[in-house]
Image (cartoon, rainbow, N blue to C red):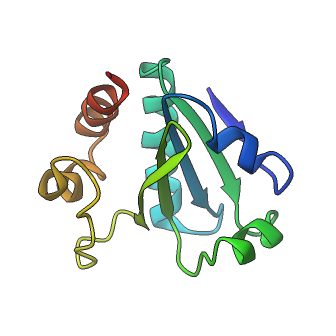
Amino acid sequence: MITPLTYDTFDDFTRRDGLVLVNFWSTSCGPCLRFHRIFKTASEAVPSASFGDAEVEIQQRLVKDLEISTIPVLLIYRDGDLIYRDPTPRPESGTFSTVPDAPRFLDIMSREKEFITFVEGMAVD
C-alpha cells in the first residue's frame, strides 16, 4: 500500500521506525509512471516497509521545502534518518554512496524484481 503524502503528513510519515520509501512523481512524466508501477508492486510485496508518494503538481509546498527539482525522486529513510536521496532511475547521476551496495542500486531501480529484492534486504534489520 502506498500512502499519499502531503505537507502536513510528510514529517510524521518519514519519522516512522523501520524503512520508509517516498516517491516524488508526476502523472505527466513517462519515467515517473514507469517507476511508480514498480514502486506500487514493491509496496505490496514488502509489507515490512512503509511506502509513501507525493505528486509534485499537487504538493508544491512540500516539493519547494525539500528542494525537489527533478523527477522522479526516491527518498529512503531508516528510523527517521534520510539514508538516500537522488533522482531515479538516472544512471548518469552516480551519487549513491549512502546506499548499501550502491553500485547495484543503479541497475535495480528500473527492474521490478530486483527493486523488490533490494527493498526486502533493506527492510531486514
User: Is 91 positioned to the left or the right of 60 in the image?
Assistant: left
- The quarter of the rendered structure image containing the C terminus is top left
113 versus 33 height, above or below: above
User: Is 77 positioned to the left or the right of 106 in the image?
Assistant: right
55 versus 95 height, above or below: above
Q: Position of residue 72 (x, y in %)?
A: 50, 65
User: Is 99 positioned to the left or the right of 81 in the image?
Assistant: left
From the viewer's side, name the closer residue of 25 and 31: 25
**Residue 50 falls in which quadrant of the image?**
top right
Picture residue at 34% right of the left edge, 34% below the top: 119
Number of marks present in the image shown? 0
Picture residue at 23% right of the left edge, 71% below the top: 91
Picture residue at 47% right of the left edge, 41% below the top: 39
Q: Position of residue 67 (x, y in %)?
A: 63, 78
From the viewer's side, name the closer residue of 67 and 80: 80
Q: Among all residues in the image, which is located at the extreme right?
A: 8
- The quarter of the rendered structure image containing the N terminus is top right
**Residue 69 falls in which quadrant of the image?**
bottom right
From the viewer's side, name the closer residue of 89 and 27: 89
Q: Position of residue 54 (x, y in %)?
A: 69, 54
Q: Position of residue 92 (x, y in %)?
A: 23, 79
26 versus 47 height, above or below: below
User: Is 101 positioned to the left or the right of 28 in the image?
Assistant: left
